[in-house]
Image (cartoon, rainbow, N blue to C red):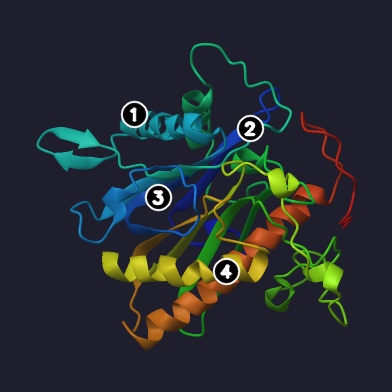
Amino acid sequence: MKNLLTDIPGIRVGHAHDESVASGVTAVIFDKAAVASVDVRGGGPGIRDGALLEPVNTVERVDAITLSGGSAFGLEAGGGVQAWLAEQGRGFAVGDALIPIVPGAVQFDMLNGGNKKWGRFPPYRDLGYTAAAAATDGAFALGSVGAGFGATTANFKGGLGSASAVMANGVRVAAIASVNAVGSVTVGDGPWFWAAPFEENKEFGGRGLPSSFTPDMLAMRLKGGPAASSIENTTLAIVVTDAILTKPQVKRLAIIAQTGFARAIYPVHAPLDGDVVFAAATCENAIDPLYGLTELGAVAANVVARAIARGVYEANALPFAGALPSWKMRFAK
């Protein structure tokens, strides 16, 4: 186990980013199309093919999911991933046509210091293609990479994180998260993380929680303060399991897994966020449809919380040398 999304067999992850733009894309590719759905809790989401993922709609399986910066411009990243998949002969068959199914979501990183004067066409379609072509089923980078490259939070550099777990019945679940939250993932200004009770093997520093909570620690910290824009934020996550699930069950998994946001970010699901959780099942291992799904959701929520904290920890463990303003070393390994 690598403590990454790629601990689920048949999953590949690739990143691409542009330092001058201070933004990027992460592509999650399924070797075989996976059953998928989505849960949306933030007040300002930006989603590609979100309606398609609802249980009442026809297409059950997807070929990839894309996470991107760039606000609405970043929705084009899915087209780049789709183009790469089409070259591989992948897609939903409609007669003789193959249509790669690539949902995705975006976060707002348009005011982070990067050069967004890209001319007639934004770079996200090309970044999506590059991310898909670079996807690997092995270890992949965390922190200031891919969709998390230009991410920020209220008090620290945001970033991309991942985590995984194996249940007692052998079912695996893993998550990847790009953290660009309006709030904070730390108790006060750290070094403690809200997700500390769920941490494993000191994956984000092993600091635990403070011995007591002061009013300052519980005070709301918002990116940009009271004047924060309603669209400058968003945390995105993808949860994948190898359990055999139907589309309604995957929808329920996404709903339960979204609890991990509340365990890791303070505040969360605000009108200032576009928080989205995608869930997918590769359908390899049987699971009880009631108790088993409930337990899977509980573990998935823990994994999401860990991935969020780990993304910020990895982004701040070393000084960031990209196009964003200088960030202090806060969580040195």
Q: Which label was assigned to residue 23?
A: 2
Asked which secondary structure carries label 2, the reply is: strand
Quarter-wise, where is residue 291 in the image? bottom left
Residue at position x 66%, y 66% from top? 264
In the foreground, 112 or 121: 112
Q: Which label was assigned to residue 30?
A: 3
Q: Are marks 1 and 2 in contact (CB under 8 Å)?
A: no
Cα separation, mark 2 vs mark 3, equals: 24 Å
Cα separation, mark 3 vs mark 4, equals: 23 Å
Give whichever of discs 2 and 4 has the lower sequence position: 2
The three-letter code of the residue at mark 4 reads Gly
Q: Residue 19 in the image: state x and y as whole percent.
A: 70, 27
Mark 2 vs mark 3: in front: 2
Q: Residue 93 in the image: state x and y as whole percent.
A: 17, 41
In the foreground, 147 or 202: 147
Asked which secondary structure carries label 1, the reply is: helix
In the foreground, 51 or 309: 51
